[in-house]
Image (tube, helix red, strand yellow):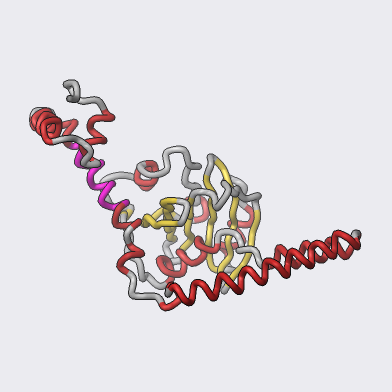
Amino acid sequence: MISMPPSERDLHAYVDHQLDEEDRRLVETFLASNPQAAAQVRGWQQDAQHLRAALGGALQQPPNPDLEPAVIRQRLQRQSRRHLASAAMLLIAVSIGGFSGWQAREMTLAGASAPMTDALQAYRLIAQQGILPADYKAGDDADMQGWLDRYFTQANRLPDLSGAGFKPASGRLLSTEQGPAAMVVYEDQNGQKISFYVRPPGPKNFLLPRGSRSDGGLQAEYWSGGGYNYAMVSPADTPAARMLRQTTQF
């Protein structure tokens, strides 16, 4: 049985439906007489609902033929053959040494996934096409930083782009294989958009050096800090893109 008044840990267990019936009634009795605690718990419950909805979004997608077991097996077999070929090339290059070794290394790395591809795709789906609706808008009863802090308490602060005329407008929770991610969309008076994307590091806790790349008319400036990977995405060859390349505040 939990102690009274309930601790913050007990309240989180109540939100996560981890209390037995007797403890649940004790917490509900406490909340009924403590409006401030009840309001905090309701906020946690709403946050949990939003996060579950974001993480469960993939289950609502239409069937994907690329995920059929036979297709996956064929793809894995092709990848295995490519990996064996790359390993063989690298072994030959190491035996030769010098410039040939460097060339083989570049060829082996060429097949690696480009950094923050998911940030670019999120920009296309949310900022450009509007396929995924926002979970949070700047006009709601809190600031955008407060919304982001609910899910990423140790992450870097949102970049301040007000000097360039951009302000946070909306936020969206997303999911990755490593855990939840989030994207905040900035807008200026002309409707131009820049996104700030934060996600857990990739497999094997892979953090990113500061870098920049372009893909499909978009530019991504990316880096790591506080245990997370980040990207600022904007249309390429625009004043906003040039501003992102020059700024050092994030």
What residue appears at the point 40 percent right and 66 percent down from the top-left corner?
126
Q: Is residue 235 above or below residue 51?
A: below
The answer to whether residue 187 is magenta is: no
Task: Please give the range of residues in magenta.
Answer: 39-51
What residue appears at the point 58 percent right and 68 percent down from the top-left corner?
236
**Res 12 seen here:** yes
Residue 147 in the image: state x and y as whole percent: 35, 46
Q: Which residue is more in the foreground, 84 or 148?
A: 84
- State left or right for residue 92 relative to residue 215: right
- State left or right for residue 246 relative to residue 189: right
Residue 14 is drawn in which quadrant? top left
Residue 150 in the image: state x and y as whole percent: 35, 42
What residue appears at the point 29 percent right and 57 percent down from the top-left corner?
53
Q: Quadrant of the N terminus?
A: top left
Residue 189 in the image: state x and y as whole percent: 42, 62
Q: Is residue 18 above or below residue 115?
A: above
- State left or right for residue 216 relative to residue 48: right
Residue 13 in the image: state x and y as whole percent: 25, 35
What residue appears at the point 63 percent right and 57 percent down from the top-left corner?
245
Query: Which secondary structure class fits the magenta region best?
Result: helix
